[in-house]
Image: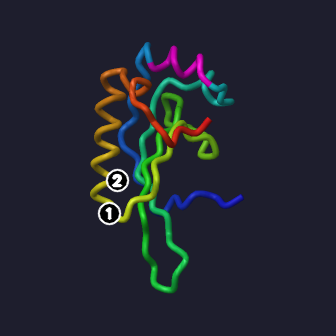
């Protein structure tokens, strides 16, 4: 299994998981990490393309994390499709941050949800 590219891993500030999202998280498919999860960690991650010149596409991932930011990189709650523009990925991460702060992440229809 390939390990993540932490060189191009840009996480946003941890966001406490709201009551509604925590209830939905605990009712959904079980993650090994959920029992300790108190926060969301949202990150923009670079995905290096297999070519001679170093070139990246970007994805946004959401991980359940504890209050110190520990998370399991193997079990994201959500990972977006890769995007060519880092600006698009940053904007998407900002949108997710807004939903998390309002305790409405589970109200989104996340088609690429990992479960």
Mark 1 lies on residue: 85
Q: Residues within 10 Å of mark 2 (few under 14, many from 20)?
A: many
87 lies above or below 26? below
The quadrant the C terminus occupies is top right
Kindly identify the residue that appears in the image at 45 percent across and 20 percent down: 21
> Measured from the top left, where is residue 66 in percent x and y?
53, 29
The quadrant the N terminus occupies is bottom right
Residue 58 is marked as none
Kindly identify the residue that appears in the image at 67 percent across and 61 percent down: 2
> Measured from the top left, where is residue 103 in percent x and y?
36, 21
The question of residue 39 being in magenta is answered with no
Mark 2 lies on residue: 89
> How many angstroms separate mark 1 from mark 2 (CA)?
7 Å
CB-based contact (under 8 Å), mark 1 and mark 2: yes
66 sits to left or right of 31: left
Kindly identify the residue that appears in the image at 47 percent across and 45 percent down: 61
16 sits to left or right of 65: left
> Measured from the top left, where is residue 63 in percent x and y?
51, 38
**For the magenta stretch, what is the residue range?**
21-28
The question of residue 23 being in magenta is answered with yes
* Secondary structure found at label 2: helix
Between residues 106 and 44, which one lies in front from this camera angle?
106
Between residues 56 and 17, which one lies in front from this camera angle?
56
Q: Residues within 10 Å of mark 1 (few under 14, many from 20)?
A: few
């Amino acid at each position: 299994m390939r390990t993540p590219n932490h060189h191009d891993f840009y996480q946003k500030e941890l966001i406490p998981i709201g009551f509604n999202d925590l209830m939905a998280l605990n009712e959904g498919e079980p993650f090994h990490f959920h029992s300790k999860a108190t926060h969301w960690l949202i990150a923009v991650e670079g995905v290096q393309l297999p070519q001679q010149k170093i070139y990246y596409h970007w994805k946004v991932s959401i991980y359940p994390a504890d209050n110190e930011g520990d998370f399991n990189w193997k079990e994201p709650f959500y990972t977006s499709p890769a995007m060519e523009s880092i600006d698009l990925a940053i904007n998407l991460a900002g949108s997710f941050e807004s939903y998390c702060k309002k305790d409405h992440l589970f109200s989104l229809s996340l088609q690429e949800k990992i479960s």
